[in-house]
């Protein structure tokens, strides 16, 4: 009976340690993502970067933040930067000029309002935003402070 109790206690102890580890990793990943998002928005605000309304193709040249950004999250980031909903944003692994198209469903007023996109844009431009960054990804900077760097280049095609 006593050995059975020790076995159950050991099992629950291992399970508890695994859950704490997964919690720590997920908090670290989400924290890194929030820090990246703050630095990304600050880069645009501090450098007074003006984007023409249209499609934003965001290309991560080395690593993606985790969890990966959804298009409506990116639309909201640009809404926070410019206080306008004039961009449809999406991420890509590599540069694909003019490959991202605004979906037809975005012309639905309820859909576009929910996904923070002005479906009545005229003369939409194609903005390719290339991001080269380091120190934001993974959990290694939880244990030792890693310098965070972000370089952004923008090609506008109107």
Image (spheres, rainbow, N blue to C red):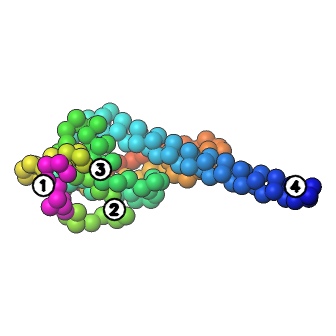
Q: Residues within 10 Å of mark 1 (few under 14, many from 20)?
A: some
- Can I make out residue 100 in this image? yes
Quarter the C terminus occupies: bottom left
Q: Secondary structure at mark 1?
A: helix
Name the mark nearer the viewer: 2 or 3: 3
Q: Who comes first in sequence, dot 4 or dot 1?
A: 4
Q: Secondary structure at mark 3?
A: helix
Q: Who comes first in sequence, dot 4 or dot 2?
A: 4
Residue that mark 2 sits on:
92
Instruction: Name which residue lies at 40% across and 42% down.
Output: 37
Quarter the N terminus occupies: bottom right
Residue interval drawn in magenta: 101-111
Q: Residues within 10 Å of mark 3 (few under 14, many from 20)?
A: some
Q: CA distance from mark 4 to mark 3?
A: 50 Å
Q: Which mark is residue 6?
A: 4
Task: Find the residue positioned furthest to the left.
Answer: 122
Residue that mark 1 sits on:
107
Q: CA distance from mark 3 to mark 1?
A: 15 Å
Whether 153 is among the magenta residues is: no
């Amino acid at each position: 009976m006593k050995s059975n109790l020790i076995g159950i206690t050991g099992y629950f102890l291992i399970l508890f340690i695994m859950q704490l580890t997964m919690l720590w990793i997920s908090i670290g990943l989400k924290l890194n993502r929030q820090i990246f998002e703050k630095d990304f928005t600050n880069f645009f605000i501090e450098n007074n970067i003006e984007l023409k309304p249209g499609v934003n193709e965001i290309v991560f040249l080395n690593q993606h933040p985790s969890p990966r950004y959804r298009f409506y999250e990116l639309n909201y980031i640009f809404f926070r930067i410019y206080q306008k909903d004039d961009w449809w944003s999406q991420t890509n692994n590599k540069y694909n000029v003019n490959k991202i198209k605004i979906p037809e469903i975005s012309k639905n007023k309820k859909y576009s309002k929910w996904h923070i996109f002005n479906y009545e844009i005229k003369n939409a431009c194609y903005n390719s935003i290339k991001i080269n960054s380091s120190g934001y990804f993974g959990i290694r900077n939880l244990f030792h402070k890693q310098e965070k760097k972000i370089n952004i280049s923008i090609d506008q095609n109107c």
